[in-house]
Amino acid sequence: MIKKEMIAMLLAGGQGSRLGVLTSGMAKPAVSFGGKYRIIDFPLSNCINSGVDTVGVLTQYMPLRLNTHIGIGIPWDLDKNVGGVSVLPPYEKIEHTEWYTGTANAIFQNMNYMESFNPDYVLILSGDHIYKMDYETMLDFHKENGADVTIAVMPVPMEEAKRFGIMITDENKKITDFEEKPAHPRSNLASMGIYIFSWPALKEALIANQNQPGLDFGKHVIPYCRDKGEALYAYEFNGYWKDVGTLTSYWEANMELIDIVPDFNLYEEYWKIYTKSVSLPPQYFGENSHVERSIIGEGSEIYGQVYNSVIGCDVIVGEGTVVRDSILMNNTVIGAGSSLQKVITAEDVTIGSNVHLGVGDEAPNETDPSIYREGLVVLGEGTSIPDNVNVGKNVMINGAAEPSDFPGGTLQSGRTLVKGGM
Amino acid sequence: MRAVGIILAGGSSSRMKELSHKRAVCAMPIAGSYRSIDFALSNMEHSKIQRVAVLTQYNARSLSDHLSSSKWWNFGRKQGGMFLLTPSFADADSNWYRGTADAMAQNLEFLKNSHEPYVVITSGDCVYKLDYNEVLEYHVNKRADITVVCREMPENANIERYGTIKMDEDDRIEEMEEKPIVAQSNIISCGIYIIRRRQLIELLEKSREEGRFDFVQDILIRYRGIKKIYGYRMKNYWSNIASVEDYFNTNMDFLQKETRDYFFKQYPEVHSKVADLPPAKYNVGVTVKNSLLASGCIVNGTVENSVLFQKAYIGNNCVIRNSLILNDVYIGDNTYIENCIVESGGTIQANSYYKGENGIKIVVEKGERFTM
């Protein structure tokens, strides 16, 4: 008989529109992070490091990059005879076929998958957080309290509590009430979107609410469990946890990795983060290069200067080029004599010679001022920039730009340039 | 491909000095992220050889660790696979491998159980890229019994530790000498051979009966008059690493753009066991010039004209010049290292000074390490 004590269901179907052009071609969990990783590597590595060897990954939005990254799970040792990783897209049914309409609806549609492992507990994860967490300790807490549902929470500053789902608990960490983004928060324990359900409780709640449109854990399932009088507990987590849902938080989280001893340390032997290695060779530094406060991935070649930056694999920084405060994802190629200030390049971006990105005064972005801000210049996957042009701040460029897109050789701050021909 | 592969990985070499205490030559780290045997294995993989035997006996721990899974070279298949063959001591007349021919003779079952008509034999301590299909095509066209891959060395090269070859105008080998004192030719054998499988089995069985154990001496040289042995001239990069000097120089070759591009950027890629290390990290006050650094390194000092292998830690105010720092070395603050090979796993205390005068110095330091 097949039996797994706890299986994980990882929600990876969302677009993550607040990451702007970075998610125009792939789901948020597939976006690169920290040089060589992708966001989904963190929950997947947590799973295997916690002894959870059965993970269903729910995909929907632009899943190709995610599928090729996960494969059969070899990098995470999730290629198992029984269990391992399974990618679970929405599928056609005899009647009532639908997309995943909400977080809990996606889980509901995969009832057969969960049932096949005969689990005692189901761990619900989302694929857009950077953290290291031992789910086994959380499970122990769940068992000790005889809980039906355990919600991972972290203390946040009281003044920020109104941005989160807040849990109100008694002295035994039993949840007595909760509020979504309260104007006047009664607690500072924010839900991290990580749940352990006892299987009977989850199954019953999903079946009972199956006709609810857009069935969601936070909006429907958790309130249902509370109203039914089930035992809900809050498991307090005090380690590093970062939601990289917006471009600015994504940029900040990357920059935190280059501190001398970062809060989130990738260099610890214990609790390794695994990823699919796209490149093996060492990185090369030229005769006239300079590097400070940066992390750099395999196979990159640095002939210019790199300061305070996170650089992926197989990146080339040309002679005399200066890169500051930037994130360059895999296969970014930059010519000679250019400068980059606070730039995020998605994968396979080509930048010519004598190009200056992030210069001049700030101006709000013309199309998405709430996304492209803080002076960031963001280049979408496969973008190319011709030689001898200047680009301002809060700019987004996606596609193959030509010299004619830069009147007078300059693209002003705040502009959005979307080109075809990628 | 219509061949099985044999990688001769048994060798130890006194010319590797202290570096051979720890591992077989073909497990030596190369170019930051690789091991010597990765090149032969990747060549086999890309030549579409499906069955590969790795013959080893000397200090195989490091090697068997590296080869603990065959998936990195795509040999974890139902058809074929990778076989690590060490001497087995099953009955009273068991022996260590007494030579390369003996190593193969002791594993004749591997050859007998194969069905491919040819065998590609290569040593595991050479850095090169080669499509064995091209050599096989040459072998078939020449109607050769054995083909030896060879290479013309520059006039001034020191070739005393190689086998030298003299060929006629048709490239049939007339003379072959192992480690000649006065070389008759500047063409050397690269230690890569193609031979028909049944022919190899026959020759190995015969040699064993006669108490002869060495493939070069007792098969190639002994049979050169009666068997048609041809030389295949290899033009691209090839380097044998089995002496300290050659090992050092081979690694330094990767600081040349053309060598790097040839191995790292051009198809096919060289594969290796994946180490799952974080990106290399550079803190404040760092200078890195003309150097290669592998993943997992943390640098706080100066590195010039050097290769840093995986997980090297370089302390504040250190200067590393013209050196190889092998895997997982910790170098304390204010240390100066020049013209050295620092053995893997070493811990070098702060304020140390090492400089190789008249050649390369091998640094083996097993100091205590305190980690965070």
Image (cartoon, rainbow, N blue to C red):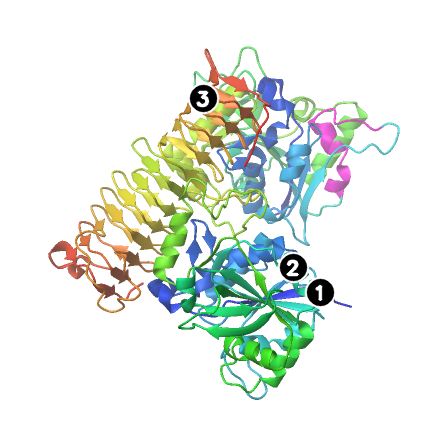
For label 3, the residue is B335
In the displayed structure, does residue A264 sit left or right of residue A170? Answer: left
Q: CA distance from mark 2 to mark 3?
A: 45 Å
In the displayed structure, does residue B129 sit left or right of residue A118? Answer: left
In the displayed structure, does residue B323 sit left or right of residue A113? Answer: left
For label 2, the residue is A53
Badge 1 or badge 2: first in the primary sequence:
1
Q: Amino acid at mark 1?
A: Lys
Q: CA distance from mark 1 to mark 2?
A: 9 Å
Q: Which residues are magenta?
A: B94-112
- Residue B18: where, in percent of width, then height? 60, 19
For label 1, the residue is A4
Magenta-span inclusion, residue A164: no
Closest to the observer, A395 or A214: A214
Secondary structure under the numbered disc 1 in the rendered image: loop
Q: Which mark is residue A24?
A: none
- Above or below: residue B132 compared with residue A365: above
Magenta-span inclusion, residue B99: yes
Q: CA distance from mark 1 to mark 3?
A: 52 Å
Closest to the observer, A410 or A46: A46
- Residue A76: where, in percent of width, then height? 59, 54
